[in-house]
Amino acid sequence: MQNDQLDKVLYFSAAQIPCHKLRWVYDREGISYVRRTRRHQWCCSDVTFHCANEELCEQWIQVANEYMLNLFNDYLSHTSLIFAANRPKSLLVYINPFGGKQCGKRIYEQKVAPMFRRASISADVIVTERANHARDHLKTEANLDKYDGVVCVGGDGMFSEVLHGLVTRIQTDNGVDQNQPDAELVPCSLRIGIIPAGSTDCICFGTVGTNDPVTSALHIIVGDSQPMDVCSVHHDDIFLRYSVSLLGYGFYGDVLTDSERTRWLGPARYDLSGVKTFLSHNYYEGTISFLPAENNMGDPRDKLQCRSGKNEILDDSGWSVIRAEFIAINAASMSCACPRSPKGLSPAAHLADGTTDLILVRKCSRLDFLRHLVRHTNKGDQFDHSFVEVHRVRKFCFQPWHHELVSLEDPIESPKKTGFSSICSAQTTSNYSSWNCDGEILPDAAIQVR
Ligand SMILES: Nc1ncnc2c1ncn2[C@@H]1O[C@H](COP(=O)(O)OP(=O)(O)OP(=O)(O)O)[C@@H](O)[C@H]1O
């Protein structure tokens, strides 16, 4: 095959197929594109090149490799994804071997590392040995000057570790006190890549649109980037955590608290805890105060998604205050979509404009709450209920109120905990719920978020 023929065939192959549905496979035998059909099968192939001479074959592979990466560059820029010209050359990779179905190491070694090698990216790999290993290493030891980016192989918890490690390190190096809620944080020049290998992988899904390690590796290789909002969470003047996806009090806090007891179940633990928490049907009293975003930031119900990264500094007037009984308070800084809930908690949440979508679900019947939950999985509008309101906000505070916990089914007496109901209400002894902050439980219920 002549050079120009290869050029044409490769061009047709790459130009006609959306990049997230495209994979390439090549070995000593030749090179082929693999394309996903409508029935989600992998069908081969648009180009296959065979060569008896090994050295010549290597040369073809090298040439084709350069062509393919250039074509993906063109493809990405034509489809208006934000494209950064400076591709990474050196990466620091953290693998959580225990995330999701415990496949992180295999995914990286079999799918991602070969692609990085072919793209001439050098990677220092650390397989974590304990929770917070990646965070602590980034905070104190890692020589960040050596790298163009940090990659985490795992789920949302792993991403959160890397985010905390990096942001904290940059602030420490620059003398910024994270405990000051109004401190101006120093931006971090290193980008974070996510190779999905967790249970929900909601951050990867919300930014890339799919949970596929090969697609994510391609985005990393070509230097694609997506800015993201990061919320800081404080209790009085103590920094607690950063959040990029969901801050949930009530229902999602209770689900997480319960699911932590059954980690051995793997991803199925969320289903079990979801059902138990739903059946418990707890509600919590508290005061939520929030600073609404300006009108030009859109509305959570306008169905207009935005990934642009605009973020103006504005004044702090116009706070609203609501005191009520809530089944759930959720702040979604991104859609929080995942394969199970393709729309997510707030389908039109903007990815990077300095706002979060605050969803307040007030006390309602169990059936009404079920209707609300089911609408996350179908075409119905989950905000179109009298007991649900949603606001796009820049800041908010929550203060819980002491309250004797009662069942909605029986507001006079406390629930009796026998038989099946004891399973359902096993976690309901507290007056407060907890905040689920991107999959981690916060130690305080009273928080300030900006
Ligand atoms: N070697 C390790 N041993 C035990 N825990 C670890 C280790 N490395 C990381 N962790 C912790 O495991 C937790 C869960 O990891 P991860 O987010 O990768 O998977 P997941 O919880 O299954 O997925 P998701 O967060 O998407 O639901 C993280 O909070 C992380 O701190």
Image: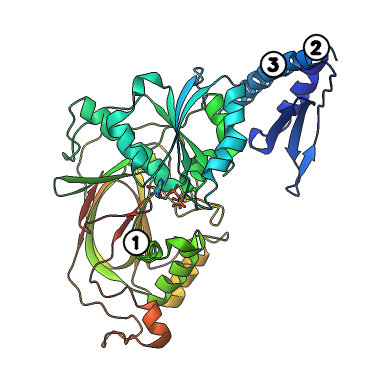
What is the image's colouring?
A: rainbow
For disc 2, the neighbor class at 10 Å (few under 14, some 14 to 19, many from 20) is: few
Q: Position of residue 247 (x, y in %)?
A: 34, 53
Q: Is residue 324 above or below residue 6?
A: below
For disc 3, the neighbor class at 10 Å (few under 14, some 14 to 19, many from 20) is: some
How far is disc 2 from disc 3 in space, using C-alphas? 15 Å
Going from N to C along the chain, the mark reached first, 2 or 1, is 2
Residue occupied by mark 2: 4
Q: Position of residue 365 (x, y in %)?
A: 40, 77
- Given this view, does label 2 or label 3 mark the residue nearer the observer? 3
Going from N to C along the chain, the mark reached first, 2 or 3, is 2
Q: Residue at x 80, y 36 (%)?
A: 44
Residue 158: name its quadrant. Answer: top left
| Residue at the far left in the pictured view | 237
How far is disc 2 from disc 1 in space, using C-alphas? 58 Å
CB-based contact (under 8 Å), mark 2 and mark 1: no
Residue type at tag 1:
Gly
Residue occupied by mark 3: 62
Residue occupied by mark 1: 253
Residue type at tag 2:
Asp
Is residue 348 shown to the viewer in this render?
Answer: no
Q: Secondary structure at mark 3?
A: helix
Q: Residue at x 37, y 66 (%)?
A: 258
